[in-house]
Amino acid sequence: MIQKFKESGYEIVDFSDKADIYVINTCTVTSIADKKSRHFLRQAKKLNPESVIVAVGCYVQVARDVLEKIPEIDLCLGTNEKSNIVYYVEEFLRTKNKEIKIDDVFKDPEYSEFGSVTYTDKTRAVIKVQDGCDRFCSYCIIPYARGRVRSRKPESVIKEISQIAKTGIQEVVITGIHVASYGKDFNNEYKLIDLLEEINKIEGIKRIRIRLNRAIINYR
């Protein structure tokens, strides 16, 4: 989302600085995460009462009835609406009408491309290849916030990493909501290991990491 704003000419500042627009990317893994999300949304408005406050992400997706009652929030965007965040912000700036845009995550059968990767530093790039989860564990809300397993097309991943390698980036981090499920939704036998093997052939890539929730596994 930062990259989307930069591409549209916006300047990114630290959260503690006074800004015209505050975007809170919410989490809903635990009740503490919910509480922190609400706290930051209210705190942002205090930093600049005239600012636009945008709530996006997982908590928005599953707690519309809660967030629509918080007066500090100007825009609520669900999981699938984040890619159009600049459009919705500029529409609000034009109309000043509070909007809640939350699509049904279960209606989207395919992975939604979000655009170019954001580089974490000079030598490493994070590549998201998968979204959603099919486990539906009794204690976990993630499938309801992110939808079912959706895998990014291999050719899209390979194309992006090939372009990244040409810039001198030598390390990529492969990530997703449940990255081990990559390929489960394809109609063939293509799996995560197949994707890693293809990435391994890209000239210039020296290291592949797999981010599995809290664990990071080196592939080479």
Image (cartoon, helix red, strand yellow):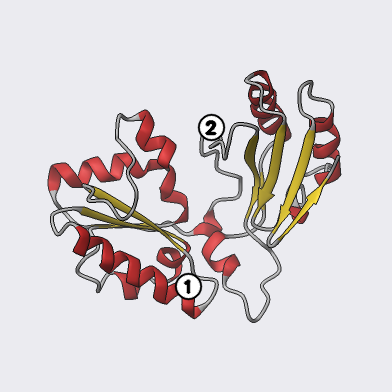
64 left or right of 130 in image:
left
Residue 177 is situated, as x and y percent measured from the top left of the image, at 64, 57
Q: Which residue is mark 2?
A: 116
Residue 122 is situated, as x and y percent measured from the top left of the image, at 60, 31
For the point 20% across and 64% down, the residue is 46
For the point 25% across and 63% down, the residue is 73
Q: Residues within 10 Å of mark 1 (few under 14, many from 20)?
A: some
81 left or right of 166 in image:
left
Vertical side of 100 occupied by 95: above or below: above
Measured Cα–Cα span from mark 2 to mark 1: 28 Å
Residue 72 is situated, as x and y percent measured from the top left of the image, at 21, 66
Q: Which residue is mark 1?
A: 33
Image quadrant where one finds the C terminus = top right
* Amino acid type, residue under disc 2 in the picture: Ser
Residue 64 visible, this angle = no
Nearest the camera: 3 or 12? 12
| Discs 2/1, front | 1
- Label 2 sits on a secondary structure element that is loop
For the point 30% across and 39% down, the residue is 87
Residue 110 is situated, as x and y percent measured from the top left of the image, at 61, 45
Nearest the camera: 184 or 167? 167
Vertical side of 1 occupied by 54: above or below: below
